[in-house]
């Protein structure tokens, strides 16, 4: 019943609203953090200290994106304004202190697992900051990476994963065995393949393979394997996330929360609803 | 200085051409000056354009190289350059670099290029610590190199590498729209190979040509052509204006002017200018002028009518309708002027109504006027068309005949005389015949000298005709000049004037009036004579002058003065009376009593009788009666002279303050006849005796008359039998 109520978002909204009314809100100064990720690569992140009595949000942006993306930026600002502690790293993708989104046609030498390693380094950084309760929030493919990370983490600090618009990976026509072989053989020639939402992804075989290997089935398995609660906030009108996909998520154990009229939350009108749900989750998890 | 309208228009047109030519010349030189100035401005603009273009390129490309240096993928390549060629060829192209960018290269921190083959020697740039752009000439081309260090995000003082941007200067300096003022030379600089130039000197090293300004180059010929066209157009326009003004304004104005001149010379057509004018204002002037002329003509005609009327009034006698004295004098002058050019025979007839004053006095002015009108109409009937009849004084008429023979004038005069004699005036109440005297004179030669004396000669003839013994029509003959009467008639004028003015020429005669019973001299009747050239002039001679000039009262004064002198001298013996004749004018004069006052001191020694004619009393009976009554009260006696010669009646006599009645000689002689008239007159004597009048019989020239008159009851007698008029000598003691 409670799960159902959460699914409709009504209780979550009430909780979030009451929390805001009782405790008030306050924005903290953002702090740019450069983290040496090794191999001469530094990662960049924005850290909002927020309230220490609540979980800190580790926000994972979309694939090849950056926190400067509108939805990420808006959510970060709103969460920060609500006093939520927040760390928004920019996955380096092998680039020193990457700042901007990386085009699909750019040279991609990074691999999926490196992204997870990098995220773990940021979790560690948070732990180093004394944050013992972490909620991973991932936008679109970032949600899958957050789930994948949660599945690999042994730290109890990570208490929940919230996937926002967890997009369905399109069916890939890549020759996975060939890619696997090429990657295993250490082929360094650049290839051009569709990877997730990129129709023309450029990179060596290991990079391509690392991502296309994470298909829907693997993602569902990650959800199932997750030791922490997984929530999926889905726009009711998001055509990329059809009812079947939501059902599969639900069956995998994720709590799917619908925002009825929303699509992909790029519309600011639905950003409030999204925020309420996130805050409610933080309260519940906290 | 006056100028004709055509001259003025020509002057304006010529002045316009000259002014426009001068203006055109000035404009031409101004355009040339402007052309030079614009070329200078263009050169300066070209120089500025090159400088701005260099500055623009530096500014834009600094940003561009900065963008490249900050690009994540540049740092990616510095991290691992395995795919640098791909990146340089594929990824850099996504930056949409302009065509003049010939290359983008990344260098390691140590200065080594990531690329294996670098065509352009970028390396020197990296030694430029302040990373200023430099101009490099390599392989015959000029390159602008800009570099930017790529900093390490976590170590601000550390440099990951460098980004270098190479531009083709010649292409970079040309903006998308092209250069407007400058045209870059094919070799944009003159730098030697391998030369390096700092960014601050780039603008000075750029070679360019100032673009030919087609607009400026085309401007002057266009201006010249335009000027020629405008000059031609202006000349045509001025000619059109000239002919237009000449035709539309000049001709109407000349027409107006000519018409006005015609009006001045009385040659213009009546009704004004007929042809309408094209120009509205001139047409309005024409209409106004025509309307004004029409009104002027109406006024002119009115004035002419009034002038003719005034001339007629001024030259016609309103009573008789004849021409008047003024017309006579004007015509006479005109005749004299004509005669000086073409002499012609001229005849002059003068007609005068005898005793017209008596008619006037007796029957009144209205009757007198009708008599004059009758005379005028009668004379006019005998004149031919064109003959001019003048009334030149109250009862004097004149007719002038030009270019006629003397007999014709005489015949007309005779016809006039006959007609007047036959004309009856009885319907006016005038019982006596109206007599006229006509004098005719003729100038045969018509010479001006002869004509000047024509009026005098006709007057002489008329005076001859007035003489009782002469026929009433006299045609002038030179022998009339020799007769005493004629001579006196002219000299009497001056004699009368001298008598009135100075009392000269007066010679008093006294005729005794005796008592018939014993022939004792009762009184003397004073009879005035004028002495001219030691010759006495009869009263009928000078009284014509006195009466015609209405000098009766003045002449009486002169006589009064002479009588007073005689009384003073004692010419009248004491105890004898003196009878003084007075004109009607004196009787009614307001100062009569004052004038007679000096006589009163002689009343104790002399009885003084004032003789007045009955016509005098009749004309102003009331006033005369009052004055005479007052004189009677002052001691004078009043005698009615010439009773029976006039037109009075016994009714008047009864109302008059008269003491003595003097019977006219014609009555006295008539009553001496044994006729019915004589017996009636005898009865009249008795009738007058009854109220107590003293009666005096004039014309007692014989004893028989004296006896009859005495028998009839006359108290006194006067006549040659009893004594002729004579001068008196002072009475000696």
Image: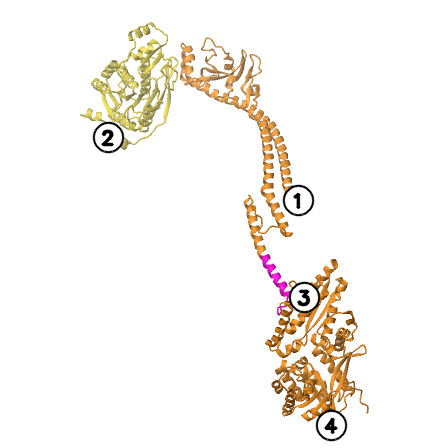
Chain colours: A yellow, B orange
Above or below: residue A90 compared with residue B651: above
> In front of the other: label 1 or label 3?
3
Residue A285: quarter of image: top left
Task: Name the mark on residue B3.
Answer: 1
Query: Is residue B333 one of those drawn in magenta?
Result: no
Sooner in the amino-acid sequence: mark 4 or mark 1: 1
For mark 2, name the chain: A
Task: Name the mark on residue B658.
Answer: none
Residue A83: quarter of image: top left
> In front of the other: label 4 or label 1?
4
Total numbered badges shown on the rendered structure: 4
Q: What distance separates the C-alpha of mark 1 from that of mark 2?
A: 111 Å
Judging depth in this view, the residue of B650 and A42 nearest the camera is B650
Above or below: residue B176 compared with residue B306: above
SS for dot 1: loop
Numbered range of the magenta stretch = B299-320
Q: What distance separates the C-alpha of mark 1 from that of mark 3?
A: 49 Å
For mark 4, name the chain: B
* Residue B367 visible in the snapshot: yes
> In front of the other: label 3 or label 4?
4
Above or below: residue B597 compared with residue B372: below
Q: Residue at x 64, y 65 (%)?
A: B314
For mark 3, name the chain: B
- How packed mark 4 is, by other alpha carbons closer than 10 Å (few <14, some 14-19, many 20 or more), is few
Labels 4, 2: one chain: no
Q: What distance separates the C-alpha of mark 4 from that of mark 1?
A: 108 Å
Q: Which residue is mark 3?
A: B326
Task: Name the mark on residue B518.
Answer: 4
Above or below: residue B216 compared with residue B330: above
Sooner in the amino-acid sequence: mark 1 or mark 3: 1
Q: Which residue is mark 2?
A: A14
């Amino acid at each position: 019943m409670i799960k159902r109520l959460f699914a409709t978002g009504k209780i979550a909204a009430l909780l979030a609203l009451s929390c805001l009314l009782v405790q008030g809100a306050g924005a903290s100064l953002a702090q740019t953090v450069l983290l040496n990720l090794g191999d001469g690569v530094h990662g960049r992140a924005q850290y909002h200290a927020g309230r220490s009595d609540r979980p800190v949000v580790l926000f994972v942006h979309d694939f090849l994106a950056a926190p400067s993306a509108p939805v990420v930026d808006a959510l970060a600002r709103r969460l920060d304004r609500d006093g939520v502690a927040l760390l928004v790293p920019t996955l380096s993708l092998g680039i020193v202190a990457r700042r901007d989104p990386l085009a699909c046609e750019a040279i991609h030498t990074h691999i999926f697992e490196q992204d997870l390693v990098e995220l773990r380094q940021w979790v560690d950084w948070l732990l180093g900051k004394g944050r013992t309760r972490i909620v991973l929030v991932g936008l679109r493919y970032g949600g899958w990476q957050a789930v994948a990370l949660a599945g690999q983490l042994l730290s109890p600090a990570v208490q929940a994963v919230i996937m926002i618009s967890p997009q369905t990976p399109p069916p890939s026509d890549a020759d996975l065995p060939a890619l696997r072989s090429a990657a295993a053989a250490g082929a360094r020639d650049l290839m051009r393949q569709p990877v997730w939402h990129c129709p023309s992804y450029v990179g060596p075989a290991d990079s391509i393979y690392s991502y296309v290997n994470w298909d829907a089935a693997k993602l569902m398995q990650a959800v199932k394997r997750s030791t922490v609660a997984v929530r999926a906030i889905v726009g009711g009108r998001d055509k990329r996330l059809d009812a079947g996909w939501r059902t599969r998520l639900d069956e995998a154990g994720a709590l799917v929360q619908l925002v009825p009229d929303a699509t992909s939350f790029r519309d600011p009108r639905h950003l409030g609803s999204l925020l309420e749900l996130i805050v409610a989750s933080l309260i519940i998890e906290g | 200085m006056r100028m004709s309208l055509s001259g003025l228009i020509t002057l304006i047109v010529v002045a316009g051409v000259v002014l426009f030519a001068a203006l055109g010349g000035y404009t031409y030189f101004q355009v040339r000056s402007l052309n030079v100035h614009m070329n200078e401005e263009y050169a300066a603009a070209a120089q500025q354009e090159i400088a701005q273009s260099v500055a623009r390129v530096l500014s834009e490309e600094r940003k561009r190289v900065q963008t490249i240096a900050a690009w994540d993928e540049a740092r990616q390549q510095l991290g691992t350059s395995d795919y640098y060629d791909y990146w340089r060829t594929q990824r850099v192209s996504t930056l949409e670099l302009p065509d003049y960018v010939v290359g983008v290269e990344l260098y390691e921190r140590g200065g080594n290029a990531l690329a294996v083959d670098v065509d352009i020697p970028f390396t020197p740039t990296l030694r430029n610590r302040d990373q200023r752009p430099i101009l490099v000439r390599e392989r015959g081309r000029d390159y602008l190199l800009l570099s930017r260090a790529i900093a390490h995000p976590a170590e601000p003082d550390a440099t990951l590498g460098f980004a270098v941007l190479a531009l083709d200067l010649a292409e970079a300096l040309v903006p998308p729209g092209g250069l407007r003022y400058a045209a870059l030379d094919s070799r944009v600089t003159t730098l030697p190979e391998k030369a390096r130039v700092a960014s601050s000197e780039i603008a000075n090293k750029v070679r360019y040509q100032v673009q030919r300004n087609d607009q400026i180059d085309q401007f002057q010929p266009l201006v010249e052509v335009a000027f020629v066209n405008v000059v031609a157009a202006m000349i045509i326009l001025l000619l059109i204006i000239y002919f237009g003004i000449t035709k539309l304004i000049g001709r109407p104005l000349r027409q107006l002017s000519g018409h006005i001149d015609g009006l001045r010379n009385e040659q213009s057509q009546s009704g004004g200018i007929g042809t309408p004018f094209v120009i509205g204002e001139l047409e309005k002037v024409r209409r106004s002028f025509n309307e004004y002329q029409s009104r002027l003509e109406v006024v002119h005609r009115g004035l002419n009518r009034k002038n003719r009327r005034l001339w007629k009034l001024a030259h016609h006698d309103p009573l008789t309708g004849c021409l008047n004295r003024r017309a006579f004098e004007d015509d006479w002058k005109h005749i004299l002027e004509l005669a000086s050019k073409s002499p012609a025979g001229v005849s002059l007839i003068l007609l005068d109504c005898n005793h017209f004053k008596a008619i006037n006095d007796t029957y009144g002015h209205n009757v007198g006027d009708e008599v004059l009108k009758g005379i005028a109409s009668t004379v006019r009937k005998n004149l031919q068309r064109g003959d001019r009849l003048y009334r030149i004084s109250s009862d004097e008429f004149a007719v002038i005949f030009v270019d006629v023979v003397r007999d014709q004038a005489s015949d007309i005069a005779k016809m006039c005389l006959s007609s007047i004699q036959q004309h009856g005036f009885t319907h006016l109440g005038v019982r006596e015949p109206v007599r006229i005297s006509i004098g005719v004179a003729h100038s045969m030669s018509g010479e001006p000298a002869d004509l000047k004396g024509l009026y005098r000669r006709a007057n002489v003839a008329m005076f001859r005709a007035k003489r009782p013994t002469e026929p009433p029509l006299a045609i002038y003959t030179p022998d009339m000049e020799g007769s005493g009467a004629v001579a006196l008639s002219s000299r009497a004028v001056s004699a009368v004037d001298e008598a009135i003015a100075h009392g000269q020429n007066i010679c008093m005669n006294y005729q005794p009036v005796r008592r018939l019973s014993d022939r004792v001299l009762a009184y003397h009747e004073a009879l005035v004579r004028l002495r001219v050239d030691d010759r006495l002039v009869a009263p009928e001679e000078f009284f014509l002058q006195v009466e015609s000039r209405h000098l009766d009262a003045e002449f009486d004064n002169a006589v009064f003065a002479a009588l007073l002198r005689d009384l003073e001298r004692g010419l009248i013996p004491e105890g004898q009376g003196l009878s003084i004749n007075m004109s009607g004018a004196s009787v009614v004069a307001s100062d009569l009593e004052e004038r007679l006052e000096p006589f009163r001191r002689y009343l104790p020694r002399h009885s003084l009788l004032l003789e007045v004619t009955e016509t005098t009393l009749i004309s102003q009976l009331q006033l005369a009666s009052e004055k005479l009554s007052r004189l009677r009260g002052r001691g004078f006696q009043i005698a009615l002279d010439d009773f029976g010669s006039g037109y009075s009646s016994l009714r008047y006599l009864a109302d008059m303050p008269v003491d003595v009645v003097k019977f006219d000689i014609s009555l006295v002689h008539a009553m001496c006849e044994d006729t019915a008239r004589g017996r009636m007159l005898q009865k009249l004597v008795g009738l007058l005796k009854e109220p107590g009048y003293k009666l005096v019989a004039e014309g007692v020239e014989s004893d028989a008359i004296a006896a009859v008159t005495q028998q009839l009851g006359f108290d006194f007698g006067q006549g040659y039998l009893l004594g002729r008029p004579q001068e008196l000598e002072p009475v000696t003691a």
